[in-house]
Image: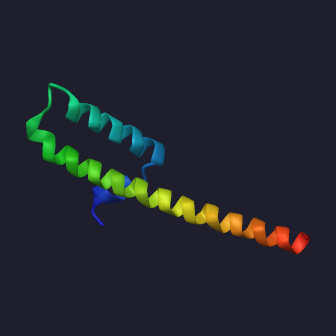
C-alpha cells in the first residue's frame, strides 16, 4: 500500500464525501485545471472505492445486528 493510499484509508467517510464533492465542483467549473485533471480523477476513484467499502461494511454490520435482534425476538416468543 502506498503512503497516499494509506492516508486515504484513514480518512473518515464524511471527509471523503466532502473531498469528492469538492473534486466534482472543480471538474464542473469553467476554470478546470487540465494539468491536474488526471490526478483529481484518480484521487476521486480512490475516494469512491474507500466510501463503497465503508458502505458495504456498514451494511454487513447492520444486517448482522438485525439478524441478532430477530433471533432474540424468536427466543423471547
Point 34% across, 51% down: residue: 47
Of residue 66 and residue 26, the one placed in the foreground of this image is 66
| Residue at far top of view | 30
Residue 75: x percent and y percent?
87, 74
Point 14% across, 31% down: residue: 32
Query: Would residue 9 be visible to someone looking at this image?
Result: no
Describe residue 10's horizontal placement relative to residue 24 as left or right: right
Describe residue 40's horizontal placement relative to residue 51 as left or right: left
| Residue at far right of view | 77
Q: Work out which quarter of the rendered image holds the C terminus and state it.
A: bottom right
Residue 16: x percent and y percent?
40, 45
Of residue 66 and residue 14, the one placed in the foreground of this image is 66
Task: Indicate whether 40 appears above or below 59.
Answer: above
Point 84% across, 72% down: residue: 74
Point 22% across, 51% down: residue: 42
Task: Indicate whether 63 appears above or below 24.
Answer: below
Colour mode? rainbow
Residue 4: x percent and y percent?
29, 55
Please give the count of numbered marks on the rendered protein: 0
Task: Indicate whether 65 appears above or below 25.
Answer: below
Task: Indicate whether 62 appears above or below 41.
Answer: below
Q: Please identify the quarter of the rendering in which residue 10 is found.
A: bottom left
Q: Work out which quarter of the rendered image holds the N terminus and state it.
A: bottom left
Query: Would residue 33 be visible to someone looking at this image?
Result: yes
Describe residue 57's horizontal placement relative to residue 31 as left or right: right
| Residue at far left of view | 35
Amino acid at each position: 500500500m502506498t503512503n497516499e493510499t494509506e492516508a486515504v484509508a484513514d480518512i473518515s467517510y464524511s471527509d471523503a464525501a466532502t473531498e469528492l464533492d469538492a473534486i466534482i465542483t472543480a471538474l464542473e467549473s469553467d476554470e478546470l485545471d487540465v494539468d491536474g485533471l488526471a490526478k483529481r480523477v484518480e484521487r476521486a476513484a480512490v475516494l469512491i472505492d474507500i466510501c463503497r467499502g465503508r458502505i458495504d461494511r456498514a451494511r454487513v454490520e447492520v444486517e448482522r445486528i438485525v439478524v441478532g435482534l430477530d433471533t432474540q425476538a424468536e427466543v423471547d416468543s
